[in-house]
Amino acid sequence: AAPVPMSQMTGSVSWQFLAEPERSRLARNQTKTLSQFAYRCAAHEYRLLASGHAHFVLYNKLMPWDHLAGALIHQEAGGHAARVDGSAYLPSHVDGG
């Protein structure tokens, strides 16, 4: 599939708690997305992501009980999970976005 232009993306962003320079870069680009949502519940946000109703979600705190199942479901649906720096998401990661 062709990449989706940022202007057509929808997603959830919780960037204010990230360290610099990621915080500034994400804050600048957040206005380029079509819309944002924030249910403040990772389970609902992963459901939207895996079902194709969102293009991305971004979290700062990565507690395994919040993200492990959602990341697996998203991956099984064909998605890609990674940290902000591009490294792979692992359940042992609890911060860093």
Image (cartoon, rainbow, N blue to C red):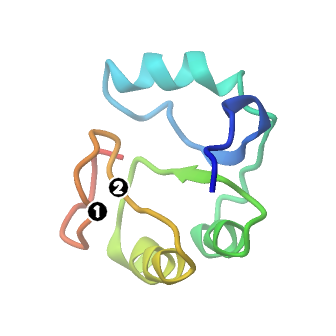
Q: Earlier in the sequence, mark 2 or mark 1?
A: 2
Query: Residue 22 lies in what quarter of the image?
Result: top left
Residue under label 1: 89
**Residue under the point 73% across and 59% down:** 39
Q: Nearer the viewer, residue 50 or 46?
A: 50
The amino acid marked with disc number 2 is Ala
Query: Residue 52 lies in what quarter of the image?
Result: bottom right
Q: Nearer the viewer, residue 59 or 10?
A: 10
- Counting from the top left corner in percent of width and height, residue 24 is at 45, 16
**Residue under the point 45% across and 84% down:** 69
Quarter the N terminus occupies: bottom right
Rate crowding at label 2 as few (under 14), some (14 to 19) or many (20 or more) other CA atoms within 10 Å: few
Task: Tell me how many marks there are.
Answer: 2
The amino acid marked with disc number 1 is Tyr
Residue under label 2: 82
Side of 92 where 30 appears, left or right:
right
Q: Secondary structure at mark 2?
A: loop
- Counting from the top left corner in percent of width and height, residue 76 is at 49, 83
- Looking at the image, is 26 positioned above or below residue 3? above
**Residue under the point 59% across and 22% down:** 29
Question: Mark 2 near mark 1, Cβ–Cβ under 8 Å?
Answer: yes
**Residue under the point 78% across and 63% down:** 53
Query: Residue 94 lies in what quarter of the image?
Result: bottom left
- Counting from the top left corner in percent of width and height, residue 11 is at 68, 48
Q: Secondary structure at mark 1?
A: loop
- Looking at the image, is 69 positioned above or below residue 23? below
Q: Report the residue that reaches farthest toward the front.
A: 1
Rate crowding at label 1 as few (under 14), some (14 to 19) or many (20 or more) other CA atoms within 10 Å: some
Q: CA distance from mark 2 to mark 1?
A: 5 Å
Side of 89 where 27 appears, left or right:
right
